[in-house]
Image: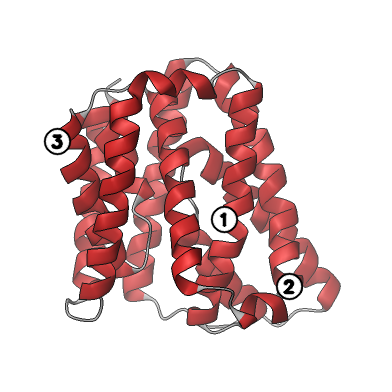
Amino acid sequence: MKIKSFFGSSIIGILGGLIGLGGAEFRLPFLVGILKIDTLHAIIINLSISLVTVLFALLFRGVDANIVSHTDIVLNLLSGTLIGAYIGVSYATKINKETLHTLIFYLLIFLSLVLFSHTFLEIKNVISLQTLSQAVLGLIAGVGIGLVSSLLGVAGGELLIPTIVLLYGVDIKTAGTLSLAISLPTLLVGLYRYHKNGRFLEILNFRDVLIFMFIGSIVGAFIGAMLFGEVNASIIEILLAVILLISAYKLFKKK
């Protein structure tokens, strides 16, 4: 399991790095399908690894002036993502396994469609809103993204980045940095809620998986970043979207 954890997370990290994502949406099927970890524990493990990935990404980038100059955007979306993460954990720990599997199945299908849209649609600001309307939509979008984050254990960058670009008219590079700043506290709230519900400590039974996936994710993300621009990211996104569709069906629809 140690070797599988390391190499699996490394490959996911490399692929994620090539397209600018953390790869958490692919770690969940890997944890459930390859490592045979039950769904709820896999979500919490994925959330933990996503937190480490985002933290290192922020450390590598350093304190970005874009975060300070766009504090209003960060706070607007964060007000929603924190609520969504809080609600999502409560829901995930109370519903039965079958309902959780079905919900995750549809969420993974949704994320695969998001990956397809990144490939075929040019993301640019197309919404012109008054400040109040913008703030309300930001809050609503944030709640939805926070729910997805806590239910799948993902940082939510694939949803946050297009939301920031479309809603606030920020360039995509800056949106990536703001996405990390929003994801970090959102992931922390999700983990805190799982801890308060008494479920977080249960993943200590999977120490080897956690340690080797932490290392593998960091190594993979580093390699992916080094290869960024050398490989056609659009082709990789399409391939991963197809893989995600197949994985979602095989792992969750038949449970």
Residue 249: give x, y in percent of width and height: 26, 35
Q: Is 139 rendered above or below residue 85?
A: below
Residue 114: give x, y in percent of width and height: 40, 60
| Disc 2, SS | helix
At x 51%, y 68%, the residue is 161
Question: Disc 2 residue type?
Answer: Thr
Question: Disc 1 residue type?
Answer: Ser
At x 41%, y 33%, the residue is 45
- Front-lying residue, 244 or 23: 23
Kindly identify which residue carries mark 1.
183
Estimate how packed mark 3 is, as few (under 14), some (14 to 19) or many (20 or more) residues with alpha carbons within 10 Å. few
Q: Is 150 rendered above or below residue 95?
A: below
Question: Disc 3 residue type?
Answer: Ile
At x 47%, y 22%, the residue is 99
Taking the image as shown, residue 64 lies to the left or right of residue 48, namely: right
Kindly identify which residue carries mark 2.
71
| Disc 3, SS | helix
The quadrant in which the N terminus is found is: top left
Is residue 248 among what the camera can see?
A: no
The quadrant in which the C terminus is found is: top left
Is residue 84 among what the camera can see?
A: yes
Q: What's the mark number on residue 135?
A: none
